[in-house]
Image (tube, rainbow, N blue to C red):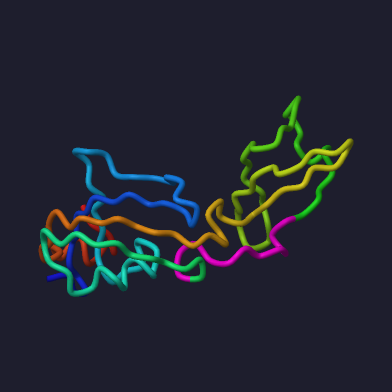
Amino acid sequence: MITKDSVVEFHYKVTDAEGNLIDQSGEDAPLKYLHGYNNIVPGLESQLQDKETGAKFEASVPAALAYGEKNDALVQQVPAAMFQGVDNVEVGMGFSAQTPQGPVEVTVVAVEDDMVTVDGNHPLAGKDLTFDVEIVSVREATAEELEHGHAH
């Protein structure tokens, strides 16, 4: 049974509210994580609690419990000159921006003349997600896994 300090392997397929496939585990590569350590989205982790090996289920996870709500303050316009060494800044490009709080990953969402609009939200922020899950295995974590806070 999945409880805190369990190492869990599961297959998943995740779709958005429109049914578009976002991601899925490989056929021979289930996702492995340490339960109870915020290593996966909280809305999915809470629904895995107390499940057993072999369980198959669908988990609906609202945006707030997945990758968070979209934060408009993380969308900003910056001068194109800030992208030194990049000849052609295009929509969809990703960059690491240095902030007082440390590096933040941003995606270019618009380019207009000498201004570039970047979005620091996770690409799935604001999206309700549905996970189709199959639990492959559950075991107790090793002392080393507990010390490191993730599955090995």
Where does residue 51 sit, x and y in percent of width and height? 17, 69
124 vs 112: above or below: below
43 vs 104: above or below: below
> Could you tell me which residue is drawn at 44 percent across and 50 percent down?
19
Q: Is residue 127 left or right of residue 136?
A: right
Along the line of sight, which residue is nearer the eye, 63 or 19?
19
Q: Residue furthest right?
A: 113
Along the line of sight, which residue is nearer the eye, 113 or 124?
124
Magenta-span inclusion, residue 5: no
> Could you tell me which residue is drawn at 69 percent across and 42 percent down?
108
Q: Residue furthest front?
A: 18
Q: Is residue 47 left or right of residue 80?
A: left
Where does residue 71 sit, x and y in percent of width and height? 66, 65
Quarter of the rendering containing residue 72: bottom right
Question: Magenta residues?
Answer: 65-75
> Could you tell me which residue is drawn at 77 percent across and 54 percent down?
76
The quarter of the image holding the N terminus is bottom left
Where does residue 142 sit, x and y in percent of width and height? 13, 63
33 vs 20: above or below: below
Where does residue 78 sit, x and y in percent of width and height? 81, 48
Q: Is residue 133 left or right of residue 128?
A: left
